[in-house]
Image: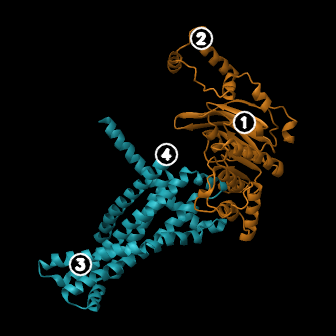
Amino acid sequence: MAAVAQETPTQTRTDDAVVRIQGLQAHYGARQVLHDIELTVAPGEIMVIMGGSGSGKSTLLRHLVGLMRPTAGSVELLGVDITRAPALEMQRLRRRIGVAFQGGALFSSMNVLDNIMLPLREHTQLDRQTMEIMARLKLEVVNLAGAEDLMPAELSGGMVKRAAVARAIVMDPALLFFDEPSAGLDPAVSSALDDLILKLREAMNMSIVVVTHELESAFKIADRITVLDQGRILTVDDVAGIRRSDNARIQNLLNRRAENAEVDAETYLRRLTGEAAPAGDPQAAGTKQDAGAV
Amino acid sequence: MQRVAEGIGKGVLRGAEEVGFAGALFLEAVLWAVLGPTRRQPVRLAAVVAQMMQIGVEALPIASVLAATIGMMLAIQSLYSLGLFGAESFATVGIALSVVREFAPLIVGILVAGRSGSALAARFSTMMINQEVDALRVIGISPVRFLIAPALFAMMIMVPCLTMWANIVALSAAGLFVTAQLDISLAAYFADVVAALSVNDLAHGLGKSVLFAALVALVSAVNGALADGGAEGVGRRTTRAVVQSIAAIIMVDMIFAFVVTAG
């Protein structure tokens, strides 16, 4: 937080950035889904990536954690360009990042304790007793003490997410990624998870990247918010800046309006055919204004 | 017509891609087994043993039932058909060669494809869809080392063992029928069996079973790795894995028999 407070909201120092994305482009087949993404995350910062369905935020996250390779550009995590790093360097980097998946992605054949111990078992030479102590400590951090012997199928949605967080932080990573932490949870559980994210940053000084479409959650936890739309960054700003933005698309997102909800059939056909809109068409004018703002 | 040709072409390309993928998985699994310990990332023996229990030991009852049934059925058919020429005394030779070279590896291969191949494909598919495989990758664990290699090696160890067991059970069951029908002792029957078989026959059957094991494991892994579409996708991939495994076993069986006996 301190690192960010000294800077302007839309910029961060790039020399010590823990995440640095430059010119990132991604395609699914012939379709381009990410266009020239440029983004940095400072140490200790919570960066929230927001956008509607199909905006490309999940694809961006998959590139950030090295599950997809971009067609162009680079992604640096903790100073390592993961698009070019050799396997051994990636292996070392993996120990310093954690990922909490949307559905938890706990291994269904293992109980909670074994799930959390797995990274320790694979990456360290610790004895089982020490690993158990470390895993139990992380379970305490996520308020899941006592659930060690439960199987993933026996956990509630909120417990699954918290167990996934415990597994993600068991190696004390410097950088933590969350994919839709609030998805599918009731408001109380969702709010508790937001508190947990803030607690993790304060207690462990982690840099955290959160992909979400939940506004309340984003406004509560974010130092800065990146808004994605159709694979492009609309804006990067702090919460106050996002709230007062006059960009129509961002306002639509804030007011939860569907992008094309008010588009009539004639306008839709014009967009499809690329035909110019008649002068004075308010919807066409709105689109131009949006594009200009982008 | 053009669409049909395009469809066939795409199917062939997809098939070739999957065969290539299976080959790459096999090589990667072997590499992990050899080089993993030097990088402190071994293929865990405990995982291999757990798979061996599931694939081999737990399949013993059903493998025994099927082998006994096949042995008995072969004895009945052999005695009937050879009896038409008054050559019942040669039935033992036919039964021994058929069981050891053909029926035991084939029935065990098909059993393992249906029982363990489907389980593996369902497990891998579910893990893909639930992002468990992604979770392994981001933790820095190779899914091939962690999931596929133990299943592959367990299958390549246990399927020949099951085949050997099926040989014994099938020949014993056939012996019960033959001795009763021909009024000979069980010792005389087994003496005939041993005389009829060579090490080459045994190696032929067991060699095939190793090949079948690798086929079932790789077909299941490929189908699991390509799964999408939720629960329906898991069902589709599981069915596809079993059908492809059985088809591959029968075709490879024919090719193997042709190549080995041609010399």
- In this rendering, the label closer to the viewer, 2 or 1: 1
Q: Mark 4 vs mark 2: tell me if same chain.
A: no
Q: Which x, y percent locates residue A287?
A: 62, 19
Give the quadrant of the C terminus of chain A: top right
Crowding around mark 4 (Cα neighbors within 10 Å: few <14, some 14 to 19, many 20+) is: few
Figure quadrant of the N terminus of chain A: top right
Camera-side mark, 4 or 1: 1
Q: Are marks 4 and 1 in contact (CB under 8 Å)?
A: no
Q: Position of residue A106 (x, y in %)?
A: 62, 56
Pointer 3 local density, CA inside 10 Å: few below 14, some 14–19, many at least 20: many
Of residues B121 and A154, the one nearer the viewer is: A154
Task: Provide the residue designation for mark 2.
Answer: A281
Residue A149 horizontal side relative to residue B119, left or right: right
Chain A appears in which tint? orange
Q: Which residue corresponds to mark 3?
A: B75
Between label 3 and label 1, give the one nearer the viewer.
Answer: 1
User: Tags 2 and 3 in contact by the CB under 8 Å rule?
Assistant: no
Q: Mark 1 — residue?
A: A216
Q: Kindly identify which chain the residue marked by label 3 belongs to.
A: B
Residue sitting at x 62%, y 40%: A58
Q: CA distance from mark 2 to mark 3?
A: 87 Å
Chain letter, cyan in picture: B
Chain letter for the residue marked with disc 1 in the picture: A
Q: Which mark is residue B229?
A: 4
Gap in angstroms between the C-alphas marked 2 and 1: 34 Å
User: Does residue B42 show up?
Assistant: yes
**Kind of residue at badge 1:** Glu
Q: Along the horizontal axis of the image, is B33 left or right of B110?
A: right
